[in-house]
């Protein structure tokens, strides 16, 4: 077959095979293909198919494909979505960018409704990728209620369900499997990546790379990345835009106003002595071994030596014990008790960094805990009881940073956290969802003269909330 004015494409293993004799298209393929089988046969990563098709159309070439280039679906909607002004602005911005891009909006601003509106507008087979099991059912419920589609049109792929439908919701973990990506490489035309910051990891970046989906968006509350990672996301997903800050949405009435209070506590004399001894053990190892790096670089250097070095292992144990002491101590426990008494009638979410801390708080105060190892059924029962006000307090260890939707939760207590401003914004966003004249209260408890105080300083020096 003469292929000078034609291009043939078909599905291959984790790639799209392209055959053409057009010299202009071959020039592009020489730069963008991952493999060249023969003189006129190339393989490209699936996400680059849209760029190839745009070039081929500009060259007025015939496109012969072994699979549908757009997988359309029928939607029977009950009603138009009522969007906020900034959500409408997001849709228009995406339209101007060929429905590709990354939207940054604070937690509680209704990012999911932007995705749902895109499904309504484009009417194509859609894959929604989420980080948690909780978000599977949350997205499913919103799509069914807001789009008015039948339950049979929406599939969930995660937990104990394996459904591929016109609209499919899947966890990052499941979507990153080679067999899923291979089987569904050409199946979806719209890709929605919720909490898109997860994609920056080496494993999850394969999801948008290995799907052809010509329309693709990312949603997140904050995206504190730069350099090559940022460029990579913009190439694979689209341009990045931050539409509104938290204070703008509060002023407009879309988020609840809040008071933030930083509480500094001291270690007891015994804890202080132990903390200094532990830090000294770690610092002396760095000095003796001539490790001049500091912070994470030093930590990873010690970690790399720990396999065959007992002194390195001892230094790491000392650092971890010191960290645990800074993150949770007697003074924090006393202050937490005071706050629980002060807000005894309100719904409170307590955030900690470690499962052990959450377990101790749960045991002492009789508060239900949700951690990464909490069984799904128990987790759902706790959350349902919390929504129905049968219980009013929850403690969690980095399990509810994403995916919880409880508008009447009004108090957030951060016992310990990570340096990431993203995590902080996600956590406070859990209590900023508006309800009546609610004013939320945010407490962050940190320990003076410890590494935690330094972490707090670094985070707030670059914060944009």
Image: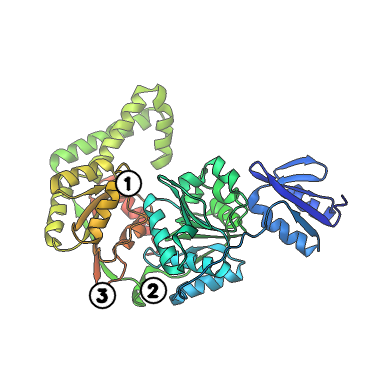
Q: Where is residue 354 drawn, in percent x and y?
A: 28, 43
Q: Residue at x 53, y 71 (%)?
A: 91
At label 2, counting other C-alpha atoms closer than 10 Å, the crowd grade (few under 14, some 14-19, many 20 or more) is few
Looking at the rendered structure, the secondary structure element under dot 3 is: loop
Let me know if residue 452 appears in the view.
no
Q: Relative to 157, is 282 on the left or the right?
A: left
What residue is disc 2 on? 248
Q: Where is residue 106 drawn, in percent x and y?
A: 40, 65
Pick whichever, 253 or 334, lies toward us. 253
Query: How far apart, in angstroms, are the residues tagged by discs 1 and 2?
Result: 36 Å
What residue is disc 3 on? 436
Query: How far apart, in angstroms, are the residues tagged by discs 2 and 3?
Result: 18 Å
Query: How far apart, in angstroms, are the residues tagged by discs 3 and 1?
Result: 31 Å
Q: Earlier in the sequence, mark 3 or mark 1?
A: 1
Whether residue 153 is situated above or below residue 203 in the rendered picture: below
Splitting the image into 4 quarters, where does residue 277 fall?
top left
Looking at the rendered structure, the secondary structure element under dot 2 is: helix
Looking at the rendered structure, the secondary structure element under dot 1 is: helix
Q: Relative to 191, is 363 on the left or the right?
A: left
Q: Where is residue 463 drawn, in percent x and y?
A: 38, 60
Q: Residue at x 74, y 50 (%)?
A: 9
Splitting the image into 4 quarters, where does residue 160 fall?
top left
Q: Where is residue 282 drawn, in percent x and y?
A: 32, 33
Can you tell which mark lies on residue 376? 1
Splitting the image into 4 quarters, where does residue 443 fall?
bottom left
Q: Earlier in the sequence, mark 1 or mark 2?
A: 2
Q: Nearer the viewer, mark 2 or mark 3?
A: 3
Pick whichever, 420 or 360, lies toward us. 360
At label 1, counting other C-alpha atoms closer than 10 Å, the crowd grade (few under 14, some 14-19, many 20 or more) is some
């Amino acid at each position: 077959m003469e292929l000078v004015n034609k291009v043939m494409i078909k599905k291959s293993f984790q790639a799209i095979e392209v055959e053409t004799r057009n010299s202009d298209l071959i020039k592009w393929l020489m730069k963008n293909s991952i493999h060249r089988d023969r003189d006129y046969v190339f393989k490209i990563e699936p996400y680059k198919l849209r760029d190839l098709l745009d070039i081929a159309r500009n060259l007025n070439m015939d496109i012969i494909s072994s699979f549908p280039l757009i997988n359309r679906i029928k939607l029977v909607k009950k009603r138009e979505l009522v969007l906020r002004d900034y959500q409408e602005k997001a849709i228009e911005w995406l339209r101007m960018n060929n429905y590709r891009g990354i939207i940054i909006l604070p937690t509680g601003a209704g990012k999911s409704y932007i995705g749902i509106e895109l499904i309504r507008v484009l009417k194509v087979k859609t894959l929604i990728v989420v980080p948690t099991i909780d978000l599977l059912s949350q997205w499913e419920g919103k799509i069914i209620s807001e789009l008015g589609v039948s339950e049979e049109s929406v599939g969930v792929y995660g937990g104990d369900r394996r459904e591929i439908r016109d609209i499919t919701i899947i966890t990052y973990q499941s979507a990153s499997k080679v067999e899923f990506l291979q089987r569904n490489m050409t199946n979806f035309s719209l890709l929605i990546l919720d909490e898109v910051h997860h994609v920056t990891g080496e494993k999850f970046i394969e999801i948008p790379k290995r799907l052809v989906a010509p329309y693709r968006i990312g949603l997140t509350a904050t995206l504190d990345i730069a350099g090559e990672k940022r460029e990579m996301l913009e190439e694979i997903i689209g341009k990045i835009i931050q539409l509104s800050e938290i204070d703008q949405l509060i002023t407009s009435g879309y988020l609840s106003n809040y008071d933030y209070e930083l509480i500094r506590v001291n270690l007891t004399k015994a804890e202080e002595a132990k903390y200094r001894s532990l830090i000294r053990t770690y610092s002396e190892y760095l000095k003796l071994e001539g490790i001049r790096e500091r912070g994470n670089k030093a930590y990873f250097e010690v970690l790399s030596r720990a396999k065959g070095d007992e002194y390195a292992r001892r230094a790491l144990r000392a650092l971890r014990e010191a960290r645990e002491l800074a993150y949770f101590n007697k003074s924090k426990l006393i202050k937490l008790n005071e706050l629980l008494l002060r807000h005894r009638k309100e719904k409170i979410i307590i955030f900690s960094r470690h499962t052990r801390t959450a377990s101790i708080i749960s045991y002492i105060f009789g508060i239900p805990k949700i951690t990464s190892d909490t069984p799904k059924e128990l987790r759902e029962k706790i959350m349902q009881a919390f929504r129905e006000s049968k219980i009013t307090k929850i403690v969690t260890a980095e399990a509810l940073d994403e995916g919880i939707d409880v508008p009447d939760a009004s108090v957030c207590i951060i016992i310990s956290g990570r340096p990431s401003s993203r995590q902080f914004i996600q956590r406070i966003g859990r209590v900023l969802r508006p309800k009546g004249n609610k004013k939320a209260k945010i407490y962050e408890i940190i320990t003076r003269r410890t590494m935690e105080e330094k972490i707090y300083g670094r985070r707030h020096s670059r914060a944009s909330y």
